[in-house]
Image (spheres, rainbow, N blue to C red):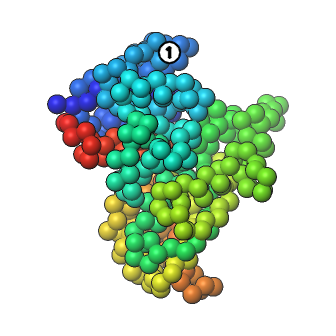
Amino acid sequence: MGYKIAVVGATGNVGREMLNILAEREFPVDEIVALASRRSLGTEVSFGDRTLKTRDLDGFDFTGWDIALFAIGSDATKIYAPRAAKAGCIVIDNSSLYRYDPDVPLVVPEVNPQAVEGYAKKNIIANPNCSTAQMVVALKPLHDRARIKRVVVATYQSVSGAGKEGMDELWDQTKAVYNPTDNKPPKKFTKQIAFNVIPHIDVFLEDGQTKEEWKMVAETKKILDPKIKVTATCVRVPVFVGHSEAINIEFEDHLDEAEARDILREAPGIMVIDKREDGGYVTPIECVGDYATFVSRIRQDPTIDNGINLWCVSDNLRKGAALNAVQIAETLGKRVLKKG
């Protein structure tokens, strides 16, 4: 016996990836529906070897459906997620709307799988920000061993994190660089993204942080440990898919780089590629389509007593969004629903 699954926002980058991953991982599905806005009504999307036609989200009745994977913006989620939850369908939401709600668990299954059991207060589980998800997967096993005091992270985030419009803008501006008569001024981003980097993701807050940076701080504390101090600089780079992070970690106890490497090799969801030679590390283009969070460049930080540096790369459309949502559904099935 399997589940009745709704994928909400099925025509977007993340929604399509959710359908792909559900099929790839052979999630026990008895029935599946692809939902989208009326302007996308009838659009065809793939689910394994099947083709689904999208149905209208606005008129859909969630009664009798087990799980809804939401991949729409916060404004639409605010309308439809409570409707689905009230109908008895458990919502796994990819937007930022519920991440900081104390009655909604924020879950990365490799880190805090037990948190899914708190879903019942609102019948909603939140998926974290893409940059946070891959980082906490790498931090968790190290934190268990030596207790993390402080994290300093600089991100290098691909344009797919800004949706299809971000990917289109990079593509159009890249072509325009070689055709001077074809001017493509920035629309999605604040400055030209082609052949450039932009130290600005989301809106600025009063203290000078951007909201993306604040999210990494707040979500790491909620998922992993409220005592950890986190400071982030989030940068958009001209890469289509794949987020990268340079992470500096300060521990309470000494942790040797060799032991850190061994711990990460054994940790769930992580692939260590760390050779001290040309090309002995993973770059974003190499992680596309993979489930793993890749860790490279593991080394001691000689400027502090208990410090480690590492490089962390992951497919943001997968681990940062769609894969994590499906993993939450799998964890929910094992721990709570126990079907399939």
Q: Position of residue 301 (x, y in %)?
A: 57, 81
Q: Position of residue 110 (x, y in %)?
A: 37, 57
Q: Quadrant of residue 35?
A: top left
Q: Secondary structure at mark 1?
A: loop
Q: Residue sitting at 47 percent across and 18 percent down? A: 57
Q: Which residue is mark 1?
A: 58
User: Is residue 289 visible in this depiction of the protein?
Assistant: no
Tell whether 87 sits left or right of 303. left
Q: Residue sitting at 60 percent across and 85 percent down? A: 304
Give the quadrant of the C terminus.
top left
Note whether 337 is above or below 268 in the view shown.
above
Q: Position of residue 247 (x, y in %)?
A: 57, 67
Q: Quadrant of residue 89?
A: top left
Q: Residue sitting at 44 percent across and 78 percent down? A: 146
Note whether 157 is above or below 4 in the view shown.
below
Q: Considering depth in this image, is 164 or 329 the residue closer to the camera?
A: 329
Amino acid at pointer 1? Asp
Note whether 95 is above or below 226 in the view shown.
above
Q: Quadrant of residue 39?
A: top right
